[in-house]
Structure formats: structure tokens, C-alpha cells
Image: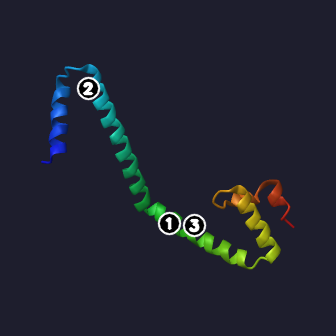
Amino acid sequence: MTAPHEEQIKRALKLLKPAEDEAARKILKKAIEELAVVEKENRHLADLYAKSSRKALKAFRAAIRRADATYKSLPAGMKLTINHLHEVSRSPFTFDALEGPIGEMFTF
């Protein structure tokens, strides 16, 4: 066992009969927070490796390829407008940028 593990065991044993209630609460709070982080990481990994995630990613990639092919076939002026919308949003491109009043301008 490594030194940090031994220290954790000593702390845990003290928690069984805490001499300082406040210190015990702090240690427990920290342990719970660490567990929450690990739980979140595990959930993330489970999502990454889930069959439904792989199917969704495959569909997303296909949609992006179709959108890319369509974008490449647009006239230069439309590409310029879409790029401008992207720059104005200052965030990763979203298809929502083409919705609403601005997007309606390009619906013929």
C-alpha cells in the first residue's frame, strides 16, 4: 500500500470515532465531491462506448458529410453569407444560425 492510501485509511478510522466533528465533515464532503467527479467521468465513458452513441455519431458524421457537400456546391455569395453568420455567432457553427428571420431571408 502506498503512503496516501495508508493516510486515507487512518483518516477513515478516525471518522469512525471522530474527535473533531468539523474535520470529519470536511473529509466526508471532500470524499463525496471526489466520488461525484468519478461518477461523472464514468458516465461520460459509458456514453462514449454505448451502442446508441456510436449509431448517433455515425449518423452525425453522415449528416456533416452531406452538409459539407451541399456547402461546397453553394454559390460564392452564399458561402460568404454563411461564413459571416458563423463569425457573428462567435461560437461553433450551429444550424440554428440558419433558422429564424435571418435564415428565412435565404429561403426561396
In the image, residue 27 above or below residue 92:
above
- Camera-side residue of 39 and 55: 39
> Pointers 2 and 3 in contact (CB under 8 A)?
no
The spot of residue 45 in percent (x, y) is 39, 56
Q: Quadrant of residue 9?
A: top left
The spot of residue 98 in percent (x, y) is 75, 60
The spot of residue 42 in percent (x, y) is 36, 51
In the image, residue 87 above or below residue 69:
above
Q: Quadrant of residue 25?
A: top left
The spot of residue 5 in percent (x, y) is 17, 43
Apparent side of residue 29 relative to residue 99 in the rendered image (left or right) = left
- Camera-side residue of 1 and 16: 1
Check disc 2 and report the residue beneath it.
24
- Mark closest to the chain's N terminus, 1 or 2: 2
Residue visible at 42% across and 53% down?
A: 44
Amino acid type of the residue tagged 1 in the rendering:
Lys
Q: Quadrant of residue 101?
A: bottom right
The colour mode here is rainbow
Label 2 or label 3, whichever lies nearer to me, is 2
Q: CA distance from mark 2 to mark 3?
A: 48 Å
- Mark closest to the chain's N terminus, 2 or 3: 2
Residue 55 marker: 1
Q: CA distance from mark 1 to mark 3?
A: 9 Å
Label 1 or label 2, whichever lies nearer to me, is 2
Check disc 3 and report its element: helix, strand or loop: helix
- Mark closest to the chain's N terminus, 1 or 3: 1
The single residue placed furthest to the front in the displayed view is: 3
Amino acid type of the residue tagged 2 in the rendering:
Ala
Mark 2 Cα shell of 10 Å, populated few (<14), some (14-19), many (≥20): some
Check disc 3 and report the residue beneath it.
60
Q: CA distance from mark 1 to mark 2?
A: 46 Å
